[in-house]
Amino acid sequence: MISDLPHDLEIEILARVPTKSLAKLHTTCKRWYALFKDPKFVMKNNNLRKSSSKEVMLLLDYRVYSISVDRVHNSIDASMEFTGRLKRLQDSKDVKLSRIWHCNGLVLCCRKDIKSLVVWNPCTGETRSIKPSKFYRRTDNYAFGCGNSSCHDYKILRCSSYGTNCVDFHQVVQVVLNFEMYEFSTDSWRVLDGVTDRWRLHCSDDVVSLKGNAYWIHFDKEADDGPWIVLLSFNFTTEVFVSLPLPDYKKGCVYGDLLISVVREEHLAVLHHVVGTEMTVWLSNKITEAKEVSWSKFLVVSFDILKLPLYSREMTFWVDVENKVLVSCVRDMEGGGDHFYILGEGLHKQVYEVTEASWIWPCLMGYVPSLCHIPKEKRRRKPNRAHNQGIRRRNIING
């Protein structure tokens, strides 16, 4: 039996077991329960399993699904299958979400009502509500990451922007910009000082996390010889914004024609869509602290065969490195439907269609299951009732 093995060998064997299977075994015995919560074991399991993991999550019509994508031999065999609807979030049968972000096995969720944030581990079912410093706004944008790539140092960057009230309709409304940071370790928000409008998060739907840091396509109006479209990064350890170059970028490139995704928590993927011509996907090789990033061309898809809706926009995509394909979701801005395609060299196939799309855009997201434990929120002391009553009595007597 495995319990008779030396402890070190037992750990080596268990660390190679698929994460989802380990999640089902955590109640087997107290020793394994404690082991699966050990950050060192969780990190070891993550490093050994992420290269073989190919989980895909899809946010569609306010609900999160797991899907599988297959490319067997040709475009006829290519398919996308809904393998399940994820219902474990707060044990609710009908959780409605408007946005999701993934970082190191955890998913940050924004509810449909935009009034609450929830952090969720789909593998273990753990959740934690994130209370705002005051209240959330519909215009808030977020980035999800962690400092030092640690399972216990998760953080949320919030960019809140709103206009000041004005009496005169013709008066220019001043936009107030506020950056806040939430830390799981302290269970509190704090203001980030010294951040200017140059680094504003314009649309958090396009923000991804890789190795703890956040990345998004950004229109930098203040860049040298600008404005330029850049790859903007936020380091959650140093809490500093860094501007990085995009692959094959030419001035005049349209902001909406560039998209970003993450491949198995190992690479950034940038998709450049030249309308009516071709779609090119680049993968990052190395990102250094010296503001340098190298890229390699992964895939070029010609539009000679593929016919997209006349008025369309790529909203989200996911890359399958092994099969050298990508899944792209396109919204027909005229017809209102969402179209899912599997694209590759000589492969152009529509595999799914939603005829009546909701107001939120679908989100395809690679997901690497993890046993990472969500730190519990701090318990706040309740006021001592007897103590407060004693103070009130003394005030009455002294008064």
Image (cartoon, grey):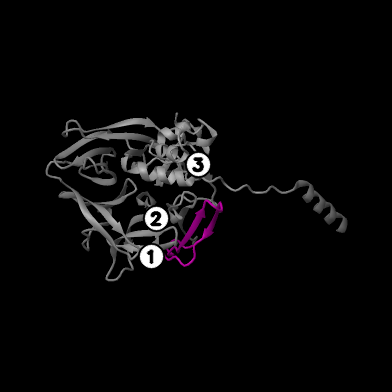
Few, some or many C-alpha atoms within 10 Å of disc 2 (few <14, some 14-19, many ≥20)? many
Residue 222 as seen in the image, left or right of residue 137: left
The image quadrant that residue 337 belongs to is top left
Q: Is mark 1 on a helix, strand or loop?
A: helix
Residue 37's disc is: 3
Determine which residue is flagged by label 2: 213
User: Residue 199: percent from the left, percent from the top?
Assistant: 39, 62
Closer to the chain start, of discs 3 and 1, is 3
Closer to the chain start, of discs 2 and 3, is 3
Amino acid type, mark 3:
Lys
Q: Identify the magenta region.
A: 167-196
Residue 388 is one of the magenta-drawn residues: no
Residue 313 as seen in the image, left or right of residue 187: left
Residue 187 is one of the magenta-drawn residues: yes
Amino acid type, mark 1:
Arg
Amino acid type, mark 2:
Asn
User: Residue 26: percent from the left, percent from the top?
Assistant: 49, 34
Q: In this rendering, is residue 198 above or below 360?
A: below
Residue 357 as seen in the image, left or right of residue 252: right
Cα separation between marks 1 and 2:
19 Å
Residue 198's disc is: 1
Residue nearest the viewer, comparing 40 with 237: 40
Q: In this rendering, is residue 173 above or below 73?
A: below
Q: What element carries label 3?
A: loop
Q: Is residue 341 something one can see in this rendering?
A: yes
User: Residue 38: percent from the left, percent from the top?
Assistant: 49, 44
Residue 310 as seen in the image, left or right of residue 242: left
Quadrant (top left/top right/bottom left/bottom right) for the C terminus: bottom right
User: Residue 177: percent from the left, percent from the top?
Assistant: 46, 61
Cα separation between marks 3 and 1:
40 Å
